Image (cartoon, rainbow, N blue to C red):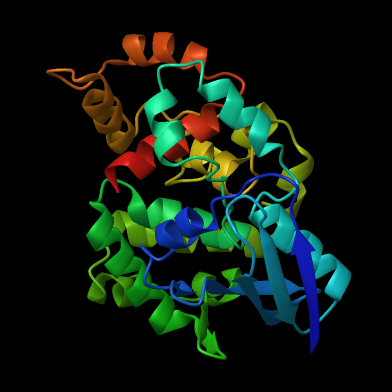
Amino acid sequence: MWRTTVELQSPYNFDQVLQRLALDPLHTVNIDEKEIKIPLIMNGKETVVSVKGTGSFDAPAFLLSGDGPEEKTVERIGEIFGWNIDIHSIHTHFLTTNLRPLFETFAYTPLVLEFNYFDCLIRCIVHQQLNLKFAFTLTERFVHTYGKQIEGVWFYPTPDVVAAINIEELRALQFSQRKAEYLIGLAQHIVSGKLDLDGLKSLTDEEVEKELLPIRGIGPWTVQNFLMFALGRPNMFPKADIGLQRAVQNLLGLKQKPDYRMLEELKQQWEPYESYASLYLWRSIE
């Protein structure tokens, strides 16, 4: 097992990161120890990586430990946690916008990516049109039934496992007929070679949308969330998200949730970092 330390040059709100990740019962988070264990697939093999905060808000540092290829794993962890992003410039930008109160409250909270592209799409499909609590419960049932646990950390099932699931099995877990069809269909799409998930990283936002939208169960909301939380694209704002609408309503003291036209006008202030606006708005109501 290797161990290495990473130090950042800009403030970083790891406490907020852990609090948000701890909302998901599938994440292995220890708030008191400032540690999270990450399930990764590196070179086709499952590996668990420990990320432990050892520094402070102003002088962030992290102790990483794990097995497998050290250099590639550290690079992937840095990508997931946004250590390669100039978060100071993003923070400074939003202090001049109508979102300043949120960026003062949750200062230097990064956009943290999903650990695996397929997991991200699974979560997006499960979470569609469900309240957050039940969405987490349903996802947890799914992973506990078809995934695997290594060193106390849960790994989502792989596409080939999901592709072989019978729809009635998911119905027994309280999945709707359509949602069960969507999950299995997505996995079959990947297993058949019709969708190359890893290849999406090199595509433009528009090209990713063109690849994903034809798949049943994937609409604009899911594509935008995938672009944001799987690929780390910085300028995404899913206007159809009810949570974002409610967060804007609360922030601005509106009597009704804002319509698309108002959101379109508001988000012009947030470019080119709309994804961070989305994150901080969600954080304000979580």
**Number of numbered markers:** 0
Q: Position of residue 202 (x, y in %)?
A: 79, 41
Q: Is residue 212 left or right of residue 263?
A: right
The answer to whether one can see residue 197 in this image is no
Q: Which one is nearer the viewer's eye here, 80 or 6?
A: 6
* 15 w.r.t. 99: above or below: below
* 256 w.r.t. 233: above or below: above
The answer to whether one can see residue 217 in this image is yes
User: The N terminus lies in which quarter of the figure?
Assistant: bottom right
Residue at screen point 37% across, 35% down? 281
Q: Position of residue 271 (x, y in %)?
A: 57, 18
Residue at screen point 50% across, 41% down? 225
Residue 105, located in which quarter of the rendered image? top left
Residue at screen point 41% across, 13% down? 266
Residue at screen point 56% across, 47% down? 229
Q: Position of residue 41 (x, y in %)?
A: 70, 73
Q: Is residue 177 left or right of residue 196?
A: left
* 138 w.r.t. 114: above or below: below
Residue 161, located in which quarter of the rendered image? bottom right
Q: Which one is nearer the viewer's eye here, 275 or 159?
A: 275
Residue 228, located in which quarter of the rendered image? top right
Q: Is residue 174 left or right of residue 17?
A: left
Outermost left residue: 255
* 14 w.r.t. 64: above or below: above
Q: Which one is nearer the viewer's eye here, 198 or 105?
A: 105
Q: Position of residue 93 (x, y in %)?
A: 59, 22
